[in-house]
Structures are given as C-alpha cells and as structure tokens.
Image (cartoon, grey):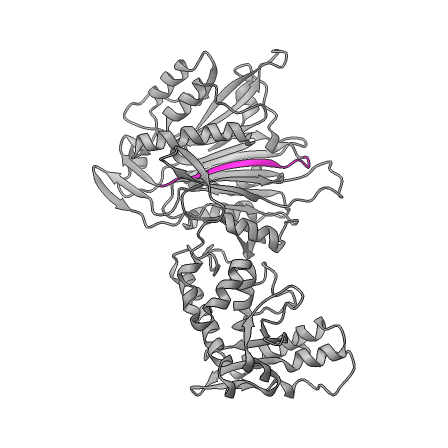
Amino acid sequence: MNITPVSAVLAKVGFDPPRLHVLVPNVDNYKALLLQPHGSIEVSGDGVRNQARELAYRQYKKFLKDASQVGADLVVTPEYAMPWKSLRDALKASVVPAQGKLWVLGCESIKYSELEVLRNELSDSVRVIFEPLAVDNDRFLSPLAYVFNAPLVDGNGKERTVVLVQFKTHPMGDPNHYEVNAMQRGTQIYQFGGGGENLKLVSLICADVFAFEDAHARAIYDRALILHIQLNPEPRHMQFLGCRERLLRFNGDATEVLCLNWAREVHSWDEGVEKSWHNIAGSAWYLKSKEYDNKDTTLCDNHRRGLYYTWLKPHRTHALFFNFEPASYLLEATKVAHIGVHGAVSIRRGPQLIKTSVWNDTATTWEEKATVEDGFSCIVGESGKAKDDVEQIADANPLAAERVLALCAGKISFRENWHSVCEVDSFVIDATEVIRRITFCQDIDESASEFRIARLKRCGSLWDILKKDDYLPPALADFKEGFKLEWIDNSPHQNAISAKGQRATVIYMGEESNDSQVEATAKRVAEYLHRWSKDQNERRSVLQRIAVWYRKDNEISLYDHHQHVQIDKTGDISEFDIGRE
C-alpha cells in the first residue's frame, strides 16, 4: 500500500489538482450526501454486484442526479455499490460534480479490460485515470471512483471532468476466498490535499485496513478526513477497530473518520443460493474535535432523522452512528480543521443531519422521511407500568429519557455533570464499539440488549414501588396523589415530579447492589443536589426529597440517607466528601 498524492498523478497527464471545498480549512460548512444501500448482492468468482440490477440502476441514477442538484460537496457510496451503468450514463448526460465538488463512489466490481473499454468510451468528455495493471480477465477489481473537475495545465482555468479509479489493495477473508483467489489487487491509495495549510482526504476500501499500519496512520491522521467504504458483515472486527484506533489515538483534534457500510441484513446470492448475513450496518462518523455541538436540540434533531450520538471513551472521540436501515443522508458539516480563522467564528459543530431519504420505487425517487424508526418503541414496554411516562419523555427528548433511566437505576458517575452525553453510561462505548443506547436500539449484540432490557425493567420496578403508599417516606407523601417521571436542565439531579409540582430524586438499585454501594449512591446524589441548590431553604427541601430503595433479603428497603443529611445546619459547607469514595 502506497499513499500517493493526487497532485502527482494528475500532473503526469496534464492536470493541476482541484481545489475541493471540503478541504479548504475555512469557516464555510460543506454538504455531504451519503448512501447506505439495501443489500441484495451477487457474489462469485466474477466479482460482486447488485443482484436486483435494474432496481439498483434506477436508485443510483437518481442518487447521482440528486447529488448534482443539491450541490453536495462530498458524495459517498460504499464498496461494490454503484453500478457502472448508472455512473456511465450520468457522465454521458453531463450529470457531474460542479467545480470544487468530489464524488467518492464505491463501484461494482469490474475487470481491468472492461475499465479500459469504459475509458475509451468516455474519452471525448471525461478523463478516466487508473493505476496500470496487467490485463487479467480471470480476475476482477474492487474499485473506488473519484469524480471531480480538474484544471488543465496551462489551460487558462479550463476544467475537465476526471474519474480517478482507486483499486482495493487487500482481499477480504470471505469463506469461498473469492477475493483471495479472484480479486486483482491495486497498490495505490490516493491522497487529496495535504501540505501547507491544506486539509487531507484519503479513502480506504474495506479490507485495505488489513495492510494499514502505524506508519500509514502517522502519515495521514493530522487535519484529515479519512473515508472507509465497506461491504462488511463484521464492521466491528478487530482489524477494523484497529484501523480506527491507529488513526484516533494521536494527540490533536483534527482527525475525522467516516465509515460507510451497507444497511443491515444484507442478502447475498452465490450460485443461486441466498444467504442472510444478519449483520449490523455500523456506518458512523468519528470526530476527535474538542469543539462539538452537543446541545440537546442539535442531538435530538440528528436522532429523529437517524444519526445517533455516542462517546468513544478510549479515544475521547465523538462517534455518531447512522440508522441501520437503507437510506440516503444529506448532512451539513464543519471542516475537519480551521486554519487562519478568527477564534470568534471558529466553532466546529460537527455533522448535522438535515435530510434522510428512503427509496420510493413507484415514484422513482429518494423520498424525504422526517422521522426514522430508532427501535425504541419495540422495547419500551419492558419498563412495565412506567411505559407511558418513559415513552412520552423519549418522544420529546430521547436524551432526557436515557438520563431519567440512568438516575432511576442510580447509575450516575462521580462527576456532577453525570448527565452529559459523555458521562451517561448508555452513551459511552468502549473499544468494542458495542452501542448500548436505549433510545437507539438496533445493535443486536447480546450484551447491549441485556443492558437495555435491565435498565428498563429497573425503571418499571421503581414505578411499582412509587405506587405503593407503604413504601413512600413521609417527605414524598404527595406522590400518593400522583406523579410522573421527568428530566429537565434546571433540575438535572431529580427525575420525578408530584401532581402538586414538587420534584424529587427517586432511585431503585435492585438486588445487585450491596449496602456500601447504596450508601455511596445516596451520598453522591445528595452532594450534587447540595451543590446545585440556590439557598439553604431549597437545599433542605431537595435533600429531604431523596429516596433510594434497594432489595435486601428479598424485601424492598428504603435507605435512610437522613443519617448523613443534617438539615438543622444552616451553613453552606457540604456535609459530604464524595471525593474519598
């Protein structure tokens, strides 16, 4: 694998490098249009392509037309996705990127001789460039087609459409060894930009990561947008996680990785035999940026359209996963770095999902869908009689629902801002990248499913406790007249409110916690409430309205936190020192 500057490749054939909007490190945002297709594919020694060819032709033809019409600065499709017929017909009809735009198209497999024919066929209007390989009609290529406009050297600014084709450099380990035995391998990975104040863009094709080493990561990670297009049944395989780890572990905040896979439940056809992969999609946008727009309004808008926030804790990276269903996604994103931009306007928000579209074959169009299914409606019933409250909270703000559920279970961190999306345990992912989000529950990993169900059931148990008058302490007597679960910014350490409008903190820690853990949680939430309160009267009230239940010796017990809360003292000094726990 050799990382080769695009500028050097273009210079050999009489072109200057393009000035791509996505790589200009200014304050201007850019539009990205991505396609996560439905997977119905043919796999054989002749290559990989769409099984429903006419359907794919219509879908991708319209996708390219949309890309041109919306003026997307960056357009991406995954590995083996784009039919060459769709791309060829678009190029012949002058449906091409405008100046400064870049299309990064994972295309169906093709043989080297067929690519030569296509180059000659398009030569009047398009310059097709690719790495010279031996003609081998017994092998196929896994290609990525970069489509852009490049200025001719000494052409007085005149530009021409260029298709620069990059070949996959390493085979995937499929059971029948189709790629191992029949895929012709390239050697070049092309890099746009770099040098001086330019940003970089590099693309890897699926199993290219098997040959991606530390030296490659060091060479490209800084001020770089790395695209990783895939047709991958296991996007969380250790080799793929390892590639991201190599890129994201470096110091600095100017690295972004965009992984684009096919949608979940790919079906492959091999010699007429259909096989379901039972795969997740795993498409995600990873950002190292220290600045990020994590306002609830922004993250909720993304969520409803199909982009879900997680915090990749080992790499201190924002990881935004796309809905696993087939769709096209139009996003507005900030540049991977700002250079020479005044600090007052250099605010990197990250990607904002502004339009999600699904295919309507009757209308032959990609049709906008205002809200996509996140899967929560299928499991919210696990919260028992708390279902209506939890569902109502999630409908208004899915982030708030996960905070409520965390507090109901006593799962709050040792930080006062435990409710931040970088702190709530359901938002945090570890190096395995298993997604435990509760209001986005398409991850089929068993541990993720167990986590979600347990969290919801704990909430249901708490609801049942609150409905039994004998379990309520005197300070919560008003709950007998009615209550609801709720989370708001102004009272982040409280999760319930009575019919009379009095807030409280109610927790059920189940039978998995011992006495010391229950005490530690009660003291912790009391300390947070102590710090949050505006005055002594409010402090006294909120501390009294803490109730922590747990199950001991098969009975529900209420922890007596008042032994640690001396409400007759009027000073502002905390009664607690949670830092020693």
> Farthest residue in the right direction?
571
Residue 262 falls left or right of residue 349:
left
Q: Quadrant of residue 382?
A: bottom left
Residue 194 falls left or right of residue 550:
right
Query: In this rendering, does residue 504 appear at all?
Result: yes
> Farthest residue in the left direction?
272
Q: Quadrant of residue 499?
A: bottom right
Residue at 24% x, 43% y: name it.
274
The C terminus lies in which quarter of the figure?
bottom right
Residue 383 falls left or right of residue 489:
left
Residue at 63% x, 67% y: name it.
492
Q: Quadrant of residue 384?
A: bottom left
Q: Which residues are magenta?
A: 26-38
Q: Which residue is at the front of the view, 99 or 69?
A: 69
**In the picture shown, does residue 240 fall above or below 559?**
above
Residue 191 falls left or right of residue 343:
left
Expressed as whole percent of the image width and height from the top left, the position of residue 126 reads 47, 16
Q: Which residue is at the front of the view, 9 or 544?
A: 544
Q: Which residue is at the front of the view, 547 or 81?
A: 547
Q: Any magenta on residue 28? A: yes
Q: Which residue is at the front of the view, 70 or 369?
A: 369
Expressed as whole percent of the image width and height from the top left, the position of residue 345 reads 73, 42
Query: In this rendering, does residue 189 appear at all?
Result: no
Residue at 36% x, 46% y: name it.
233
Expressed as whole percent of the image width and height from the top left, the position of residue 56 reads 35, 32
Residue at 51% x, 86% y: name it.
469
Expressed as whole percent of the image width and height from the top left, the position of residue 299 reads 57, 52
**In the picture shown, does residue 289 fall above or below 366?**
below
